[in-house]
Amino acid sequence: MKRLVILISGRGSNMEAIVKACAAEGWPATVAAVISNRPDAAGLAFAAQRGIATAVVDHKAFGRREDFDVELARVIDGFEPDLVVLAGFMRILGSSFTARYARRMLNIHPSLLPAFTGLHTHERALEAGCKIAGVTVHFVTAELDHGAIVMQAAVPVLAGDDAAALAARVLVAEHRIYPQSVRWFVEDALVWDGEVVRHRDGAPQQLLLS
């Protein structure tokens, strides 16, 4: 039984999708804790209502990012996770932290990486005239929004889209592929081929939504 620790900063809609899928689909896993860097994160209430342990490591209490990382790792490790899942966790993590959880920490980013790393992905995709946009689940490394890709979903950019409309369409895809990617991890279905991650049985690692 794999133990998951999910990190959030706000509403935690991807966290909710993972928690619900884990329960409904009977994964060989348990969500051991939901941790936030913000005490007012709405997702903490959802987790508590589900009987999931919660914790807060407020980044504002630390003068240095390194000190925050150390305390966050201490709290995470108290729950003995097999996998750390970043679900809208809006803090950049240092290299020592990412090395600590190498190949056992996932993130989701609202673009088709390696395109549009960082912030304001939907605005940038629209400004670039992209005809498709999407989302990527990847393992976390010290380099922001890099690391081996587990799964991607592509969605169309429609005439008249603004950033909010595109973000809403991408979010639907996020809620499909993030639980799937976590499930693959807990079922030991992901294999490493050098620095590339493949599904053990060749399951498609891309989703095209119309």
Image: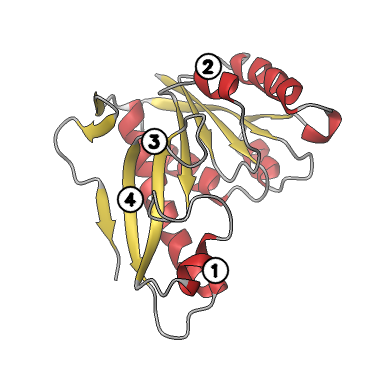
Using the rendered view, name the quadrant where residue 200 is placed: top left
In x, y percent, where is residue 162? 53, 77
According to the image, label 4 marks what residue?
Answer: 152
Task: Locate residue 71 relative to residue 12 in the image: left or right.
Answer: right
Q: Quadrant of the C terminus?
A: bottom left
Quick one: label 2, few (<14), some, or many (20+) residues within 10 Å? few
Between disc 2 and disc 3, the foreground one is 2
- Residue 148 horizontal/vertical position (percent): 35, 35
Alpha carbon of mark 2 to alpha carbon of mark 4: how far?
25 Å
| First of labels 4, 3 by sequence position | 4
Task: Name which of mark 1 and mark 4 comes first in the sequence.
Answer: 1
**Label 4's element?**
strand
Distance CA(mark 2)–CA(mark 1): 33 Å
Q: Earlier in the sequence, mark 2 or mark 4?
A: 2
Q: Nearer the viewer, mark 2 or mark 1?
A: 1
Q: Secondary structure at mark 3?
A: helix
Q: CA distance from mark 2 to mark 3?
A: 19 Å
Amino acid type, label 2: Arg
Residue bearing the label numbered 1: 123
Task: Name the residue carrying label 2.
Answer: 100
Residue positioned 45% across, 19% down in the render: 82
Residue picked out by circle 3:
182
Q: Residue at x 21, y 34 (%)?
A: 199
